[in-house]
């Protein structure tokens, strides 16, 4: 017994060694793990910034090439084109001596040095300037191009404030970075960022001549250091903590909204409501838009703006859309509708990347046409419409399926894309309809969109019509169809049947 006690009765330094050695190992391991973890997250945040700025500069480069093509036209052409280009302060056209056209001020005649006195504008170039005559205190990026044969160039000035705003932290690990700057040829935006040299991480663009400087947050590092240290301490604590975290994670996973969406599809918890679409000319309903709703068994009615983004992020939007198709077919199986009646479905661009896309839509088309209904596919703008997706859309149109761009002006679609994208319908978002009767810039944009749609021979649908003034205004401008609370709210199938009966009595 005394020997056992003696074995346990170690000298103080040995007890300290027994206690401190694993603590030391845990501290070193936690420090290295936290450092790797934080650097990885900072790179992730920086990658988002680099990608955003790459996209912006590439777009500016495209605009400068387009501007060069306008060098022999009226300056008003450049002004009109830049009206639809957000994030850019202005575009300039110049020769080897002078700037003679500005999208902001029109025809001008000023020395080329107004753009830059130090940078070479007779080569494709990107550089930072401290400001412009109209905004001298706000830095900007200049993206320029040059035609050696014609000896003309064009420059696009990217709004510096937009760049500063884009440095707002992404939602993923927002506290990982405490300071961000853009650097081109030794100049930065902001002009004098405060960095400690040992905290700076530099990420270079592979596409353009710029770098993003990021200062890592010490608080973020120490936060995760203590987390890793706690995990690295006694095995019993690790096991208990791991078990608790696993149980909590499993419960969260089982009850996560993404899993609930998957279960909701299987259990047919989703249902459709339908909002009539009215012909502006005769006031008759020519179709409906199918809108999905979710009756969650515990949460009750869940708003679409909550579950649709989660379905998109969780790769569930395609099965949910397929469910909507089948639900609509069941709903309309015994419906009697007017000839040419249309059902509009919202479809995310992701749907057009599926291998069975044509067979799905052929089935939808044939099933609806048997009951006298034509499908109209409304493409949502939350994701980028790639050339492959546009080609797929054209293939569907060849099959007799009508295609619309939904909520135009609020998402990824640009005027240049509209000129090449195959479409039948264009739906104008409610935010533009709300400007009717107001003397604002946006109200003039509405007229421009309508005029553009007519020139491209699109059928125009106005969403969110709530007043007779709006309806009269849109009808006077030859908008073809109107949709909104002025005529009817979204309604369940039974209510829709009654509404249609009453509607066609008059």
Image (tube, rainbow, N blue to C red):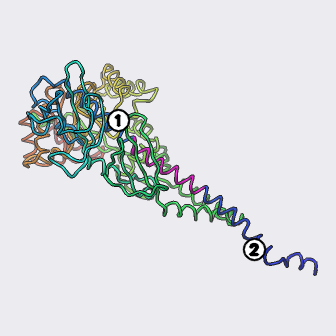
Quadrant for the C terminus, please. top left
Relative to 22, 112 lies left or right = left
Q: Is residue 190 visible?
A: yes
In the rendered image, the residue lying farthest to the front is 118
Q: Nearer the viewer, residue 44 or 212?
A: 212
For the stretch drawn in magenta, the main secondary structure is: helix
Q: Nearer the viewer, mark 1 or mark 2?
A: 2
The answer to which of marks 1 and 2 sits earlier in the sequence is 2
- Asked whether residue 46 is drawn in magenta, I would say yes
Q: What residue is at 42 percent from the left and 24 percent from the top?
A: 359
Please tell me how crowded label 2 is: few (under 14), some (14-19), or many (20+) other residues with Cα within 10 Å: few
Q: Position of residue 188 (x, y in %)?
A: 33, 48
- Asked whether residue 249 is drawn in magenta, I would say no
Residue occupied by mark 2? 16
Q: Nearer the viewer, residue 363 or 68?
A: 68
Q: Measure how far apart labels 1 and 2 are at the Cα level.
A: 61 Å
Q: Are marks 1 and 2 in contact (CB under 8 Å)?
A: no
Please tell me how crowded label 1 is: few (under 14), some (14-19), or many (20+) other residues with Cα within 10 Å: some
Q: Position of residue 64 (x, y in %)?
A: 24, 30
Residue occupied by mark 1? 384
């Amino acid at each position: 017994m005394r020997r056992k006690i003696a074995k346990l009765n170690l000298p103080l330094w040995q007890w300290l060694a027994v206690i401190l050695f694993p603590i030391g190992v845990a501290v070193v391991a936690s420090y290295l793990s936290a450092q790797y973890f934080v650097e990885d997250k900072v790179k992730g945040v920086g990658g988002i910034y680099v990608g955003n700025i790459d996209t912006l500069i590439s777009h500016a480069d495209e605009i400068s090439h387009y501007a060069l093509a306008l060098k022999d036209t009226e300056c008003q052409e450049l002004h009109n084109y830049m009206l639809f280009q957000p994030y850019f302060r202005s575009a300039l056209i110049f020769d080897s001596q002078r700037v003679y056209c500005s999208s902001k001020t029109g025809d001008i005649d000023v020395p080329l040095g107004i753009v830059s006195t130090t940078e070479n504008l007779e080569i494709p170039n990107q550089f930072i300037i401290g400001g412009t005559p109209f905004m001298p205190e706000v830095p900007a990026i200049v993206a320029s191009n040059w035609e050696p044969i014609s000896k003309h160039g064009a420059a696009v000035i990217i709004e510096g404030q937009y760049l500063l705003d884009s440095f707002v932290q992404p939602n993923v690990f927002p506290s990982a970075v405490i300071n961000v700057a853009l650097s081109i040829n030794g100049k930065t935006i902001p002009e004098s960022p405060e960095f400690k040299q040992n905290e700076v991480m530099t990420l270079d663009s592979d596409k353009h001549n710029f770098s993003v400087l990021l200062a890592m947050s010490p608080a973020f590092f120490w936060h995760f250091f203590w987390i890793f240290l706690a995990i690295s301490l006694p095995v019993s604590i690790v096991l208990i903590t791991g078990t608790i975290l696993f149980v909590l994670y499993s419960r969260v996973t089982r009850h996560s909204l993404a899993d609930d969406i998957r279960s909701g599809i299987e259990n047919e918890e989703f249902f459709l409501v339908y909002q009539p679409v009215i012909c502006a000319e005769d006031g008759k309903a020519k179709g409906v838009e199918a809108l999905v709703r979710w009756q969650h068994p515990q949460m009750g009615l869940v708003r679409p703006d909550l579950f649709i983004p989660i379905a998109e992020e969780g790769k569930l939007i395609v099965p949910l859309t397929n469910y909507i198709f089948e639900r609509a077919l069941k709903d309309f199986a015994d419906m009697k509708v007017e000839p040419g009646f249309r059902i509009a479905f919202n479809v995310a661009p992701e749907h057009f990347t599926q291998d069975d896309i044509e067979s799905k839509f052929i089935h939808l088309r044939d099933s609806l046409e048997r009951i006298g209904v034509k499908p109209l596919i409304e493409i949502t703008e939350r994701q980028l419409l790639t050339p492959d997706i546009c080609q797929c859309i054209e293939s569907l149109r060849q099959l007799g399926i009508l295609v619309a761009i939904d909520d135009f002006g609020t998402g990824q679609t640009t005027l240049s894309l509209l000129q090449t994208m195959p479409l039948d319908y264009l739906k104008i978002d409610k935010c533009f309809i709300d400007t009717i009767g107001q003397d604002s810039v946006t109200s003039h944009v509405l007229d421009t969109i309508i005029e553009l749609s007519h020139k491209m021979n699109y059928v125009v649908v106005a969403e969110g019509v709530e007043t007779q003034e709006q309806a009269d205004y849109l009808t006077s401008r030859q908008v073809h169809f109107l949709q909104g609370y002025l005529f009817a709210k979204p309604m369940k199938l039974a209510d829709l049947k009654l509404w249609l009966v009453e509607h066609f009595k008059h």
